[in-house]
Image: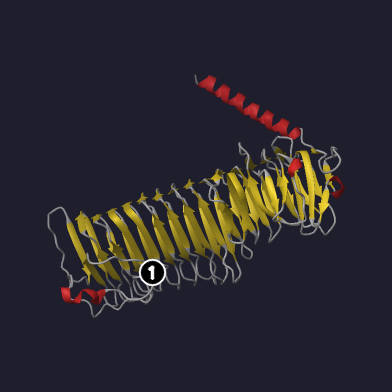
Amino acid sequence: MLRITQTIRIKCYLLNLLILYTTFASAEIVFDGSLGPAVSLNGPDFEVTANFGKLHGSNLFHSFKTFDLTAAQTANFSGPNTVQNIIGRVTAGEKSSIDGVLRSSIPQADLYLLNPDGFIFGKHARLDLQGSLFVSTASQLKLGSFGVFTTRLPERSVLVSASPSAFGFLDVKPATIEINSSNLVAKEGETLSVLGGEIKINRGLLRAISGRVNLAAITKANELTITPTGLNVAANAQFGKIDLENNAMVDVGRQGTGDIYIRGGQFFLENSFVIAANTEVNERINVIRIDVKELRLDNQADIDSRTYGPGQGGQIIINVAGETRLSNNSTIRTNSLGTEAGKAGNISLKAQRLSLFTNSSITSNAFSLGDGGNITIKIHDNINLNSSAAISADSADLGNAGNIYVSSTNLAMDAGTISTAADKAEGGNIVINARNQLIMYNSVFSANVAGGQGNGGNLAISNPGLFQLTDSQITANASGGNGGFVLIVTDILSELGESWISASSESGREGDVKIDDIYNIDINTLPVEFLDVSNLIKKRCNGISETQSSSFFLKGRGGLPNAPDDLQTYMPIGVW
């Protein structure tokens, strides 16, 4: 049975190689005759000149029957220097195979390639363009308010001089764009857009240095528009899948400021990376924005925004209609790196459900003089943190730790951590708003400062009907500064095993711990300036043990519940 299975696999592999070879071996560029002469160009260097198409103002239109390139071939687009947009379509009903070089000799001209049957880019595919590249399986490209360039029904095209304004995906069977070990790099400051029914990137690289990368998987939509702040589609749009696997990468380089926008149904990263970075001081903050229905990161996948210079780090904005899942050492993070780097960027995540497994994390770290960034996580249903998963906002040098706000219906932690940590500066604040249950097993909430004179952070846990701690820790400790403030508001606090709550300091004032059930906490409750709780401490709590096998301790300067006439005296004041 094993030999038969191996034989079948070998035959399938050889068949795939044959298909791939046949596809690339038959590579050619042939015009369909709808906009110019119906001729086939001679290679290996195909000269796609203006006389093969039609010129309308700053738009140069081409219509191809087939558009294919082998590894040894180049397609060079040329025309008047007044051309701003080279717009080509493929009409034969077959996928375009590109394993050669796409080149343009027209200064600053953008290249649009449309094939509703899809594209496949091979490992030798390269870009040598003066402007941006837009590769799409759209069935039409709208031109301003009145023009349209169609692929399925070329005769219905209305060619005008207006610039491209929107992509239309109207096909019954949406097509795929595959990028297999390709190295597609746009000119510095330009845009690289891949817009298909489905996108597969296997070992491939998409890079737009100091520019922009757009990925959109759209199966049906009247309009997809590319705006300065995102990818916009109609409310009734249908979305496809985006797959990055086997060390695939999408990035915008380290120079200047670049953005990445991703829109689709399922967005899966397996051992792959989405990276934005900058080294300069810019008024505009770089952005990674992801709007999908499902997000999965697995096997050391990474969504990463970095700053190497003194400016503000870039932000990560993720909106997921369904589940977000990170597993096997995967990370969503912002970092401040380098000796003079500024503040790490902020992270915003909204989803229906969130699960972090096996050393996966959502983090904001400052490894230099800058502060850690803030993390805001709003989940409609449940959050699960298991197997050393973490949410953290840290500073490893002289910068302050960032702040963390987490909101969900239920929060379950098994060997998980939510923490802010400062090495020498001020600790960060943590607000946890679990509306139903908060279950901690062998887990940690901490807002600590390891050294220096920084104060411990403030930590508030609000609103769970049931709060259960088992062998877990809640700490807001400091070294030379003052201990932080811990506030827990819950109907039921249940403790099992060895757990403790601490707001202490090695040499500064002890912090304060309050447990009550009188009001809710939100993101505006904890102050940026650290609370002086020295006048609020009423009595040190001694260790209390109700059973021989279970213990619960409020270490440091935890106080007894306030009397009815002074309930408000310990409420933090200010804006977080």
Look at the picture and state if 420 lies above or below 77. Answer: below
Residue 242 falls in image quadrant? top right
Q: Position of residue 73 (x, y in %)?
A: 79, 42
563 with respect to 42 (left or right): left
Disc 1 marks which residue?
Answer: 428
Query: Residue at left 70%, top 56%?
Result: 144
195 with respect to 84 (left or right): left
440 with respect to 121 (left or right): left
Query: Residue at left 13%, top 59%?
Result: 545
Look at the picture and state if 264 lies above or below 494. Answer: above
Between 330 and 377, the residue placed more toward the observer is: 377
Label 1: few (<14), some (14–19) or many (≥20) C-alpha neighbours in 10 Å: many
Q: Position of residue 187 (x, y in %)?
A: 71, 57
Between 122 and 152, the residue placed more toward the observer is: 152
Look at the picture and state if 339 lies above or below 65. Answer: below
Answer whether residue 297 is visible to the viewer in this image: yes
Residue flagged by tag 1: what amino acid is it? Answer: Gly
Q: Where is residue 266 in the image (x, y as percent from the top left)?
A: 51, 45
